[in-house]
Image (tube, rainbow, N blue to C red):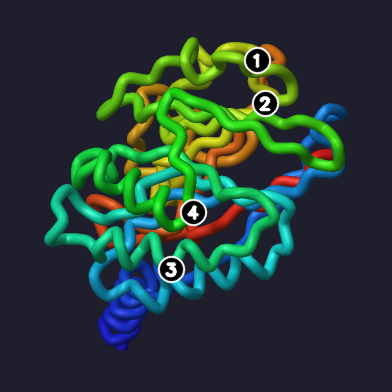
Amino acid sequence: MMKIILLGISIFLLIWVFKIEPSMLTVKEYRVKDKELAGLKIVYAADFHVGKKDTTRLARIVDLINAQNADMILLGGDFVKGHKEKSTLPIEIIAHELSHIKSDYPVYTVLGNHDMWVGGDKIQQVLDKNGIKVLRNSNAQVTFKGKKIYIAGIEDLTTGFPDQSKAFNGVKHPTILLSHQPDIFPKAWGDANIILAGHTHGGQVVFPVIGAILVPSAYGQKFLSGYIEENDKKMIITKGLGTSILPVRFNCKPEINVVIFE
């Protein structure tokens, strides 16, 4: 009898980590005190990793983003899955679906390491054509309720050449910095009001007490997910939406982030 119970539990856990939890979509909200950005509500999403059969999931993600009625939408890269075009849904289809995101402002993004592996220049071109503005060591300016806000973005730490001097060229406060990887945080300039990052997927598989087993950060579990504030610098790391290396999630549900500045 015990063997049957253990077998049942094992089967349930396998179904959970491979099918159920990776398919979930949740919303994690942060309220951040910042007088310069007070009143602004943004949605931040990253690490889509859209596979060849993920068109329905991508549409659900877009619907969830739109349902938040945010002022601005910012993205953190890794739209594609794997290392080659044959392993991912074509970027043309991904970008077309993302063009259905509703926002009063352009949707700004950086590219992730997987985007660069599959073909960063092509992905940037297709995203730009569909209204998703890619920031590669550059910035953009928007006007929110009469106030100028800057969005800066740097290239990926491992597959690009992040250059903060270029990204912050001409920038004034307040500024939101997009960085695919959170490891930029210790070396990030103080010009940004907040840094938005991803890449880690929150560890994907997170055990109680032990913590995450997939830790793609040089700083270990310190920069896995959540809100971080040190030395007058702030950062939010999303757990992301997709999976990498292993197609599993446990105790680490896919999420988009809503950030409300107060």
> In terms of depth relative to the viewer, which is nearer, 34 or 13?
34
Q: Earlier in the sequence, mark 1 or mark 4?
A: 4
**Badge 2 amino acid:** Thr
Q: Nearer the viewer, mark 1 or mark 4?
A: 4
Q: Can you tell which quarter of the image residue 130 is in?
A: bottom left
Residue at mark 4 to residue at mark 2: CA–CA distance:
21 Å
* Vertical side of 173 occupied by 16: above or below: below
Contact? badges 1 and 2 (CB < 8 Å) = yes
Q: Count the marks: how many?
A: 4
Which secondary structure, mark 4? loop
Q: Secondary structure at mark 2?
A: strand
Q: Please tell me which of labels 3 and 4 falls first in the chain.
A: 3
Residue at which label 1 appears: 191
Q: Residue at x 87, y 29 (%)?
A: 35
Mark 4 against mark 2, which lies toward the viewer?
4
Q: Position of residue 2 (x, y in %)?
A: 32, 82
Local crowd size for mark 1, using a 10 Å CA cut-off: few (<14), some (14–19), many (≥20)? some
The amino acid type, in three-letter code, at marker 1 is Asp
Q: Using the image, tell me which numbered label, if any, was put on residue 245.
A: none
Q: Position of residue 116 (x, y in %)?
A: 25, 39
Q: Residue at x 76, y 38 (%)?
A: 143
- Labels 2 and 3 touching (C-beta < 8 A): no
| Quadrant housing the N terminus | bottom left
Task: Using the image as rendered, state which of residue 33 and residue 52 is in the foreground.
Answer: 52
Q: Relative to residue 180, is residue 15 drawn left or right?
A: left
Residue 131: image tag: 4
Q: Please state which amino acid type lies under the numbered disc 3.
A: Glu
Q: Secondary structure at mark 1?
A: loop
Measure the C-alpha gap from mark 2 to mark 3: 28 Å
Residue 255 point in image, percent of width and height = 54, 58
Give the labeled residue for mark 3.
97
